[in-house]
Image (cartoon, rainbow, N blue to C red):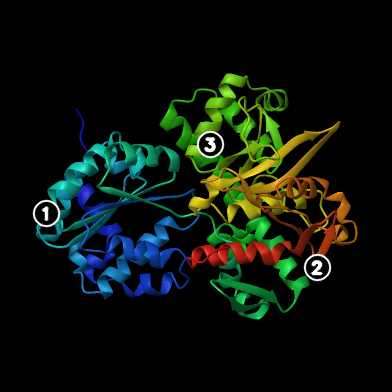
Amino acid sequence: MLQIAEADILQSLQRDNPWWEGKIAELQSKFPHRRAYFSGFRELVLNWKIRRSTILMGPRRVGKTVMLQQLILDAIAEGLPPQNILFASIDTPLYSGMPLQRLLDLFHKQTACEPSARRLIIFDEIQYLKDWEVHLKVLTDQYPETRFVASGSAAAALRLKSQESGAGRFTDYFLPPLTFSEFLDFSGLETKLILAKDVGRTRRYETTDIEALNEAFVDYLNFGGYPEAVLNPDVRSNVQRFLGRDIVDKVLLRDLPSLYGIQDIQELNRLFSTIAYHSGNEISLEGLGKSSGVAKNTISRYLEYLEAAFLIVRVTRVDDAGQTFQRMRNFKVYLTNPSMRAALFAPIGPDDQAMGPLAETAIFSQWFHSDELRQLHYARWKSGRKDLEVDLVRIDPATLRPTWAYEIKWSDRFIDQPGELRGLIELAKSKREFPVHVGATTRTKHSLSEIDGVTIRHFPCALHCYQIGKNLTEGRPP
């Protein structure tokens, strides 16, 4: 059997670990911006008192590899010898199928670091190694002073294997697309447009210029989920070329087929394009089948695969009492990153018809790193001959009752016509023994409306999107 020369592998490792030769100045200037999630990730990994490996998960192009490089810089700044740090991307062809222990052996040979010493070992894109969780579990037990980090883009698949084989040894950490607050920070707009004030345990925000904030919000919907697009004008000016192709070519045409043995790649591509175009809309397996031309049983599997790649999230339906349905025929599907739609099709403007569903997608995307996501649903039920609906309902896990609900709108007209928010009103009226706080987003205005004994709070959509992401990333209630 033909084998890859060891010298070529060692050369590749040397190239990917420039700190072994003291070359860190270039890295320090290369990554000036840090994700809001970095400090929590850093504290988790560089905690030498707890012997656990960390599994960093998230979709492509949201900054996982950059965050790993920043982690390396911090570890060196804290005194960890550069020769005790290894970074290896498992999707590198030279490492194809190579056991993790073999990579460690070559690392020892190249740097002469002591296996018993404190070390930081990073395996990027680990999903490309079969049975990676078994390899990593053995290494975690074998080297108690080493902190292992494995990262990948197939989030659900990684989490499943992590929980099955790494119980007590692995800790999962999700890195979602950029929140709107991170987008404003990276763009240099946060301090110009946002004012903060503390109200009890919660921090509330105001804007100095709602029109400018809305303009930034539309930019966020079009390209803001990707750090590269925010920081690089060339990428931002042509997201379809630089990011759309990356999603289609690398995830749909390579990642998912290689992980799950998908044969009809065009069928998967067609289904995802349908979902992406209709992000934030209620759909059914039957409806998806008709619009995409894919069989229902195949659609169910594909939806699982797309969730595994952290491209979509499904949100279940409840009735006005907060109860789920025995047969879940209908559900909502959201892109995990609203700017995927622009990357695949075309950017939208503030008055486009797609603004409403994409604003709803953006609101949901702020919750993706929070455990609260599991309590979020949408409601739709029959009242007489009418179908009533509420976009976002939080169900208390203890009482299984709604605690708050609101409609996501990109319009100010519901302030003057609150009676049109009939679903919201009926939901609040039917739960007087369990008060439900209700609200509706607007395009530019703050206000309070009272109708049928129900008080509805109105607040700008862009400002609300900012507040959710900002408070969640800083560990406060949204």
- Is the C terminus in the top left, top right, bottom left or bottom right quadrant? bottom right
For residue 109, the mark is 1
Q: Which residue is mark 2?
A: 447
Going by the numbered disc 1, the residue's amino acid type is: Lys
Please report the residue visible at 59 percent of the width from the left and 51 percent of the height from the top.
337
Which element is circle 2 on?
A: strand
Going by the numbered disc 3, the residue's amino acid type is: Leu
Which element is circle 3 on?
A: helix
How far apart in space, not on screen, are marks 1 and 2 (Cα)? 67 Å
Badge 1 or badge 2: first in the primary sequence? 1
Q: Which residue is mark 3?
A: 306
How far apart in space, not on screen, are marks 1 and 3 (Cα)? 40 Å
Q: Is residue 154 visible?
A: no
Nearer the observer: mark 1 or 3; the answer is 3
Tell me where residue 137 appears, x and y as whole percent.
Answer: 22, 43
Badge 2 or badge 3: first in the primary sequence? 3
Crowding at dot 2, Cα within 10 Å, few <14 / some 14-19 / many 20+, comes out as some
Which element is circle 1 on?
A: helix
Nearer the observer: mark 2 or 3; the answer is 2
Q: Confirm or deny contact between disc 1 and disc 2 (CB under 8 A).
A: no
**In the image, 74: left or right of 51?**
right
